[in-house]
Image (cartoon, rainbow, N blue to C red):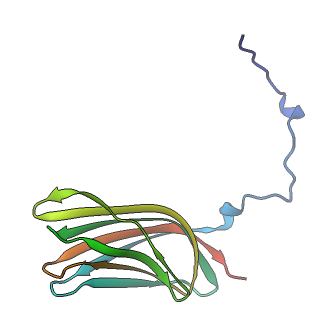
Amino acid sequence: MLAHFAILRSAQAAQSPGIQNVNEFNTPFQRTFHLQIDTDRFADTEYFDIPAGKTLVVEFVSAKADLPAGEQPINLAILSPNFVHSLIWNFQGSENEKDIFVGAQQIRLYAVDQIGVTVSRNNSEGFASINAHVTGYLVNTP
């Protein structure tokens, strides 16, 4: 037997006026890092300066790497002056003499001053292109 109950709006618990959705006051953050590793180089890093008085809360990072066939990524990391977080790469397939790797990871980290993305590979025989996407929000630093 399926029962259906209706609760009158007047009988529902009222939300305290002191409770607010904190996310309404945070500034969304989305940034794409375009990294290019030229022939004869093993790695590339790109940085972004965080506005003064703000802390960046990173919630999700994704990346796609197009490497010359046979090469493999060694490291995908999010870095700041106080930390380095290495993330996981997964092989997707091959296309047009390129091997494609992706990484996507939900994380929680806090960055002040600067954040960067670094990528390295096991060989330097050709050009590699990597796009990394960082999403989260900015909050006021106390």
Q: Residue at x 82, y 27 (%)?
A: 7
Q: Residue at x 21, y 56 (%)?
A: 93
Q: Residue at x 64, y 85 (%)?
A: 53
Residue 38 x, y percent position in the rendering: 19, 83
Locate residue 138: give its quadrant.
bottom right
Front residue (pair 123, 21)? 123
Front residue (pair 82, 88)? 88
- Quadrant the N terminus occupies: top right
Q: Residue furthest top?
A: 1
Residue 15 x, y percent position in the rendering: 84, 48
Front residue (pair 138, 111)? 111
Locate residue 71: give its quadrant.
bottom left
Q: Quick check: 83 above or below 8?
A: below
Q: Quick check: 129 above or below 93?
A: below
Front residue (pair 36, 70)? 70
Q: Quick check: 138 above or below 80?
A: above
